[in-house]
Amino acid sequence: MSYKFTGKDSTGSEFESDKTQGVMVHFGFTQWGIGLETYETKVKNTSEDVNLKTNLYNITYGATGDGKSKGFWKYFGAGYGFGTDELVCSYCKTYFYKSFAMQYILLFDIPFSKSFSVKASLHQKTSKIRHKTKAERDDFSATVINIGLGF
């Protein structure tokens, strides 16, 4: 998984990600699919360890690997996800709210056989976490690229 912040904090400084750990699971049915993402991203260049905890639920159409699919939607798909983002650190619950997060997803299915394929997805996530002590928000939006296996 590749994770790159595209947003900035309330002072205009850019965020950088260090590493991301977690899982993305997607179940594809005939044309529709559902998914769950839960992962933590370490935020670089902070005074102490700060992680962004993300939980998203997805619904997708196309690129499920279904043998009955034909045409464009057999190899490409689109989707939408929603959930929460939360900063995790010693002072984060005191100074930051948990936020609503949403994303748009592009899916790609590259079949190698009837039962095996490589899956890739591009996620454009939007998330703004509000401060509890002031009316400003930090923009934790990101671009996420994921590559996995399909069975």
Image (spheres, grey):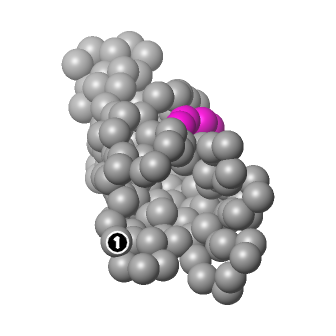
Crowding at dot 1, Cα within 10 Å, few <14 / some 14-19 / many 20+, comes out as few
**Along the horizontal axis of the image, is 112 left or right of 150?**
left
Residue that carries the numbered disc 1 in the rendered image: 13
Question: Which residues, given as a range, are shown in magenta?
Answer: 36-40
Q: Quadrant of residue 141?
A: bottom left
Q: Percent position (x, y) of residue 15?
A: 36, 60
Q: Which residue lies furthest to the bottom in this view?
A: 135
The quarter of the picture where the N terminus appears is: top left
Is 26 rendered above or below residue 113?
below
Q: Percent position (x, y) of residue 72?
A: 30, 52
Is 36 rendered above or below residue 116?
below
Q: Quadrant of residue 108?
A: top left
Q: Percent position (x, y) of residue 47?
A: 46, 49
Q: Which secondary structure class fits the magenta region best?
A: strand
Is residue 123 at all visible to an observer of this figure?
A: yes
Q: In which quarter of the image is residue 119?
A: top left
Is residue 54 at all visible to an observer of this figure?
A: no
The quarter of the picture where the C terminus appears is: top left
User: Which of the pair 87/22 is nearer the observer?
Assistant: 87
Residue 109 is inside the magenta segment? no
**Along the horizontal axis of the image, is 145 left or right of 20?**
left
**Along the horizontal axis of the image, is 75 left or right of 51?**
left
